[in-house]
Every structure is written in structure tokens, then in C-alpha cells.
Image (cartoon, rainbow, N blue to C red):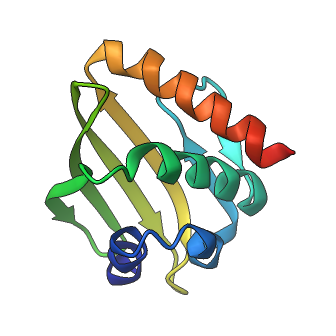
Amino acid sequence: MLNHWHTLIKNKAIDQVSTLLADDVTLFSPVIHTPIQGKKMVSMYLTAAFHTFLNGTFNYDREFLGANSAVLEFSLNIQGIDINGIDMITWNEQGKITEFKVMIRPYKALNMINDQMTAMLAKLKQ
């Protein structure tokens, strides 16, 4: 599963994100209090994240692997702000993502990312 994820990121294959998600996937966002549930909604939020994050500066720096999970540390720069974060990903026996949790620092980056993703989500919902 993880190799497919990295290929998807490398190729910016935004339209393929849903192929990696389980039907009952849950996303924990750093800016939204309530977990986002279901393949359709999580796919929409990850699509908005791809548009926001995959700006040419995004890079996975380190990986911590478990049997069916991974913590991927990333870095990027948006509007002059150096951002660090982690994606915590869990998948099932079929290789489909069941849980995706994102944490980001510094705090000032959260508001900027929230604004950009909110604008992107509005476009996606049209």
C-alpha cells in the first residue's frame, strides 16, 4: 500500500486517491474537530490537500513503519512558511487505507492551510 501512496504523491495522481481508500475510512484533520468519515468525503478532503500541499516543495523526509501502519514525516514551504508535519496512515488486509491522521506545525501554518483548503473544497463541491 505504501508504495502505491508514494507513487500517487510523486505523480500527483490526485484522481486516483479514492482507489487507496477503504469504504469506511476516517480522516483526522489538524484543523477540523470532527473526524471526516467515508470514502467520498475523505477523498474530497485529500484531493484538496493534494492541491494545497503538492506545490513542488513537498517531501517525505522520514518513515516509521508498522505491520499495517506508517508515520510519514513531511516538509514543505507555502507562502514562505516552512511547514513540518506527519501523516499517520493505517490500512487493512486488502491494502486499503482505513485511517489517515495529519498533524502540522507551526501553528501559523494551520490558518493559512485551512484557508487554502476551504477555498479548494468550495471549488470541488461545485
Please tell me whether residue 72 is drawn above or below residue 102 in the rendered image. below
- Extreme residue toward the left, this view: 62
Q: Where residue 36 sits: x, y (%)?
A: 68, 42
Position of the C terminus by quadrant: top right
Q: Where residue 124 sits: x, y (%)?
A: 76, 48
| Residue 41 left/right relative to 125 | left
Tell which of 23 and 9 is nearer to you: 9
Please tell me whether residue 60 is drawn above or below residue 69 in the rendered image. above
| Residue 73 left/right relative to 3 | left
Give me the residue at 29% from left, 63% from top. Answer: 70
Marker count (numbered): 0
- Extreme residue toward the bottom, this view: 94
Position of the N terminus by quadrant: bottom left
Give me the residue at 50% from left, 73% from top. Answer: 13
Give me the residue at 17% from left, 61% from top. Answer: 64
Name the quadrant containing residue 122.
top right
Q: Where residue 40 sits: x, y (%)?
A: 77, 59
| Residue 108 left/right relative to 101 | left
Q: Answer yes or no: is residue 31 visible.
A: no
Name the quadrant containing residue 16.
bottom right
Q: Answer yes or no: is residue 24 visible.
A: yes
Give me the residue at 74% from left, 51% from top. Answer: 41
Q: Where residue 6 sits: x, y (%)?
A: 33, 73
